[in-house]
Amino acid sequence: VVDSSLSGAAIVGATALYSPGLAGHLLLGSTVGSLVGYTLCSAPIEEITCGLWGYNSALTSMGCGAFFVHSPRTVALSIGGAAVTAGAVGAL
């Protein structure tokens, strides 16, 4: 959660070197979390651009990608988990 695009790109790049599929889950989760924060929780744009809304959702999606066999159901679980995680962050 550092306000640096370079740090974020380095994390995604390193994850992609390890597992391109896991990097896809990372990007998917971060995107879903940010969208939920913006649309459903009316989060300030400053919080979204700092990554506060995408971080926990990205971790949830990466957990789904790491512990479940890749399938359409896993992708759906990843998306749903990221959305629920962002909703829980919004409830705090």
Image: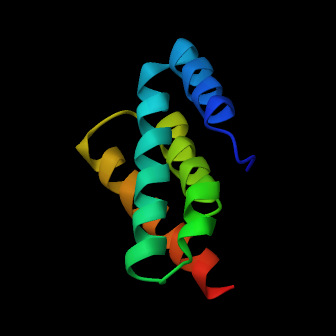
Q: Residue at x 64, y 24 (%)?
A: 10
Viewer-nearest residue: 51 or 55:
51
**Residue lying farthest top?**
17
**Residue lying farthest bottom?**
91
Can residue 33 be spotted in the picture? yes
**Residue lying farthest left?**
72
- In the displayed structure, would residue 43 be above or below residue 32? below
Pinpoint residue 41: horizontal percent, then vertical percent: 48, 83
Pinpoint residue 70: horizontal percent, then vertical percent: 35, 33
Q: Quadrant of the C terminus?
A: bottom right
Pinpoint residue 24: horizontal percent, then vertical percent: 41, 33
The number of numbered discs placed on residues in the rendered structure image is 0
Q: Which quadrant holds residue 62? A: top right
Q: Which quadrant holds residue 40? A: bottom left
**Residue lying farthest right?**
2
Q: Residue at x 71, y 48 (%)?
A: 3
Q: Residue at x 31, y 54 (%)?
A: 76
Say how the picture is coloured: rainbow
Can residue 51 be spotted in the picture? no
Viewer-nearest residue: 42 or 67:
42
- In the displayed structure, would residue 74 be above or below residue 44? above
The answer to whether residue 23 is left or right of residue 74 is right
- In the displayed structure, would residue 4 be above or below residue 76? above
Pinpoint residue 90: horizontal percent, then vertical percent: 59, 81
Q: Which quadrant holds residue 5? A: top right
Q: Residue at x 42, y 71 (%)?
A: 36
